[in-house]
Image (cartoon, helix red, strand yellow):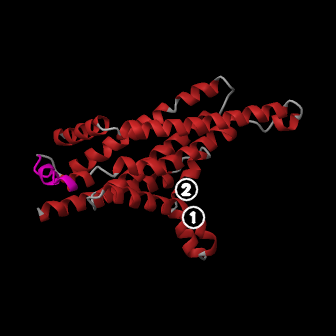
Amino acid sequence: MNGLLAIFKKEMANFFVSPIAYTVIGCFLIIAGFFFWANVSLLSLISLQAANDPSIASRINLTDVVIHPLVQNMSIILLFLLPLLTMRLFSEERKTGTIELLLTYPVNDFGIVFGKFMAAVVILLIMIGCTLSFAFIMLTLGSFDIGVFISSYLGLILMGSSFIAMGVFISSMTENQIVAAAISFGTALMFWVISWTSSFTGQTLGAIIHQVSIIERLDSFLKGVITLSDVTYFVFFTALFLFLSFRSIETQRWRG
């Protein structure tokens, strides 16, 4: 446990000593803030129109107009930014040759992988946590479904953690950070858009594609529905790539 914490602290220090964490967090908040402003502006416009048409007023709510599209946009932003967090976790160690030194630490391979993973997850939580200020702003605009808000953010965290685990594995396979980021983004994008092919791949294959699609799993959380199958999917996805990362580092140890 001490070794795992040492790896975690080392990675957190690396994130904030370099401009990576500040840049990623800053970009995320600026873009998310822009979308929040745009959604609130749309809400204001619809409210003005509703003043002349009562039938529109009955359909206006913060959940559908602001929260749902905001979280969807935030998930897409994470799709682009999370590879920037994970690309250096192992690639930099391999390129500089410090991977051999890292493997001599009194910590097992699981501790190395999980320590790096948790450091990136903490950055994710900071990014998402900063957007909770949007909820306080929305309280001044009216009421919204707090259950949908919580489930949407839970889905966002689970999805982000899954992408981080995948990025950790890909980073462990190459010493080039740009290559790691590009492959991580491409693979995440594939899991994101794969559901688009389910309509013309046949019933059986389409059902399988529907089950492995991240966007389909996230959509349930956005609707305020938290199911065991969706949570299990994200947990299994994360655990699978962490296990593959563990095996990758184990292979590095044997070769060393």
Q: Is residue 97 magenta?
A: yes
**Front position in the image: 3 or 43:** 43
Q: Position of residue 125 (x, y in %)?
A: 42, 37
Give the magenta part as a residue range: 95-105
| Residue occupying the point 59% across, 37% down | 34
| Quarter residue 6 falls in | top left
| Quarter residue 38 falls in | top right
Of helix, strand and loop, which one carries label 1?
Answer: helix
Q: Amino acid at mark 2?
A: Ile
Q: Is residue 105 left or right of residue 149?
A: left
Q: Position of residue 108 (x, y in %)?
A: 16, 51
Is 19 located above or below residue 212 in the figure? above
Name the residue carrying label 2.
215
Precedes in sequence: disc 2 or disc 1 = 1
| Residue occupying the point 44% across, 47% down | 81
Q: Quadrant of the C terminus?
A: bottom left
